[in-house]
Image (cartoon, helix red, strand yellow):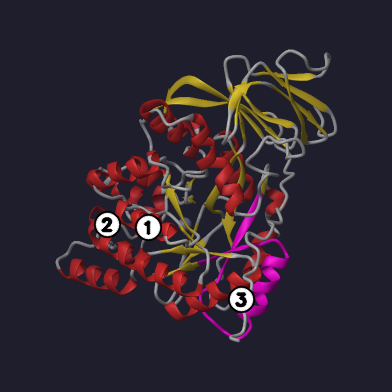
């Protein structure tokens, strides 16, 4: 099979975010050529047998950190490893973050990270990131959007590292509004967290096993309220990454009801794992921000997802290993935060929500593929199987049963937070750009052909209010 050739994905049930029906998929020159009546396609082509399987647009993971350095820790993977793990899990596009290191400008961080795309076995896009305001920021934002990077991350926490103050958040949101981009925000109220951490440390409760107590739900809910007020005031779009509480999601739902373009991303681990993991033999393996929440909160977050109030599901993939996590497990303030998850996102979500709770498969596709593509300016090239779309296709075996075992996974770490979880539904074949890349658990084409994707503007820039008469 060559990228220039033709391929027929035959006999499966095509599922997109809006419909599902038996159809064969004809691929030509790396793109979807047509969806056709089953069995009516041309003979003699290379074929992928999808009988009894679902045929999905490749997953789009809106939240991945690849080769990310925070303080003295750097995640263990690069683009080749992260995208290899991604495709084994049915994800064929990742969106990574260009987070400036000390002394680096947002534009320099973007250049550094963009140069890595070619090492991927699938395509990737980027979120830019602003930490401090200066007079060069408006021009940087304008050129990011013009160059196809339309989302800009800011953090309300990690003082002295990546935290942006509220003034910076307001100004960046306003400028993005005027050029058709969107702010992407990590919300946890820094002053509340620092105070609670200080109290926990005083009582000797600041180790990995105490992590959930050091970053209360209230801190997230308070920061979401503040950021939503800014978005409402300046009429700007805002996307909340990894919302972990029902109260935070509810605020976003109410804001949408008032006409604000506000969106909720949830991530797999907050939807499936709870704070009891901090009593596990390896609490350090679960240290992420926001932390895993109570079982009641996890349940309520799942209710919001089933009710259609969660727009996208990401992984927040951050590939540290146990040795890195153990180094400072006595004090979460100095530990590397984040969990590996790009490979397990789709199988775990399919199993927990489609199989166990009856979520329609179309909505699984919406949250894991189509909506992330839309909100990153990549739709319908990604996240769809429309004629002309990139031929990134996942043949999914909905009945395959297995248990998550890190030795079967491809992420550059020695553990999975989902270790031991029984999962129904798995990748059978993955096509990237018209080439069969994964089939029956084997990487058939390891050639790095990843492209950095240029996103299109998300919104029409605001029409200025008419001058008073
Ligand atoms: Zn993240």
Left or right of residue 452: residue 287: left
Q: Is mark 3 within 8 Å of ligand 1?
A: no
Residue 67: name its quadrant: bottom right
The residue identified by callout 3 is 105
The residue identified by callout 2 is 211
Does the magenta portion include 151?
A: yes
- The image shows residue 446, relative to residue 169, as above or below, that is above
Q: Residue at x 34, y 41 (%)?
A: 302
Residue 3: name its quadrant: top right
Q: Mark 1 or mark 2, which is nearer to you? A: 1
Q: Residue at x 56, y 39 (%)?
A: 85
- Residue 363 visible in the picture: yes
Q: Earlier in the sequence, mark 1 or mark 2?
A: 2
Looking at the picture, tell me which residue is in the foreground, 131 or 101: 131
Q: What's drawn in magenta, residue-wise? A: 124-153
Residue 364, horizontal then vertical, whole percent: 49, 35
- The image shows residue 186, relative to residue 194, as above or below, that is above
Does the magenta portion include 261?
A: no
Q: Earlier in the sequence, mark 3 or mark 2?
A: 3
Marker disc for residue 254: 1
Looking at the picture, tell me which residue is in the foreground, 140 or 337: 140
Left or right of residue 296: residue 7: right
- The image shows residue 441, relative to residue 387, as above or below, that is above
- Residue 60 visible in the picture: no
Name the outermost residue toward the left: 203
Q: Residue at x 43, y 34 (%)?
A: 348
Q: CA distance from mark 1 to mark 3?
A: 35 Å
Q: Is mark 2 within 8 Å of ligand 1?
A: no
- Mark 3, Cα crowd under 10 Å, few <14 / some 14-19 / many 20+, is some
Residue 339, horizontal then vertical, whole percent: 42, 49
């Amino acid at each position: 099979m060559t990228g220039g050739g033709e391929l027929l994905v035959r006999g499966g049930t095509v599922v997109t975010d809006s419909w599902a029906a038996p159809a064969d998929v004809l691929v030509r020159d790396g793109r979807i050529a047509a969806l056709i009546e089953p069995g009516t396609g041309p003979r003699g082509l290379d074929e992928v047998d999808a009988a009894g399987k679902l045929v999905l647009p490749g997953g789009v993971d809106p939240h991945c950190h690849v080769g990310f350095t925070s303080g003295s820790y750097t995640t263990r993977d690069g683009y080749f490893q992260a995208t290899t793990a991604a495709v084994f899990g049915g994800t064929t596009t990742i969106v990574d973050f260009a987070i400036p290191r000390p002394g680096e400008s947002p534009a320099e961080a973007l250049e550094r990270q963009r140069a890595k795309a070619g090492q991927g076995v699938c395509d990737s896009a980027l979120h830019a990131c602003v930490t401090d305001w200066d007079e060069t920021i408006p021009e940087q934002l304008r050129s990011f959007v013009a160059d196809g990077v339309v989302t800009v991350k800011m953090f309300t926490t990690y003082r002295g590292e990546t935290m942006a103050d509220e003034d910076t958040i307001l100004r960046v949101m306003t400028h993005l509004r005027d050029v058709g981009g969107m702010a992407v925000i990590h919300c946890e109220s820094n002053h509340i967290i620092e105070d609670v951490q200080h109290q926990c440390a005083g009582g000797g409760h600041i180790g990995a096993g105490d992590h959930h107590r050091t970053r209360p739900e209230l801190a997230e809910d308070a920061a979401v309220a503040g950021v939503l007020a800014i978005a409402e005031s300046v009429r700007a779009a805002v996307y909340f990454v990894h919302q972990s509480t029902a109260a935070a999601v509810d605020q976003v739902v109410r804001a949408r009801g008032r006409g604000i373009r506000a969106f909720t991303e949830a991530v797999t681990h907050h939807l499936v794992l709870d704070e009891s993991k901090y009593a596990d033999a390896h609490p350090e393996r679960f240290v992420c921000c926001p932390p895993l929440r109570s079982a009641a909160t996890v349940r309520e977050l799942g209710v919001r997802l089933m009710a259609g109030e969660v727009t996208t599901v990401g992984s927040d993939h951050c590939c540290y290993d146990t040795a890195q996590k153990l180094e400072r497990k006595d004090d979460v303030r100095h530990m590397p935060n984040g969990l590996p998850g790009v490979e397990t996102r789709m199988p775990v979500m399919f199993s927990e929500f489609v199989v166990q709770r009856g979520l329609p498969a179309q909505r699984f596709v919406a949250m894991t593929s189509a909506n992330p593509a839309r909100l990153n300016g990549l739709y319908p090239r990604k996240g769809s199987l429309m004629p002309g779309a990139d031929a990134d296709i996942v043949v999914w075996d909905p009945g395959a049963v297995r248990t998550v075992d890190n030795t079967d996974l491809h992420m550059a770490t020695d553990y999975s937070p989902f270790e031991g979880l029984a999962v129904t539904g798995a990748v059978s074949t993955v096509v990237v750009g018209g080439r069969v890349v994964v089939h029956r658990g084997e990487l058939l084409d390891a050639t790095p052909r990843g492209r950095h994707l240029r996103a299109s503007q998300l919104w029409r820039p605001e029409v200025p209010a008419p001058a008073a008469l």
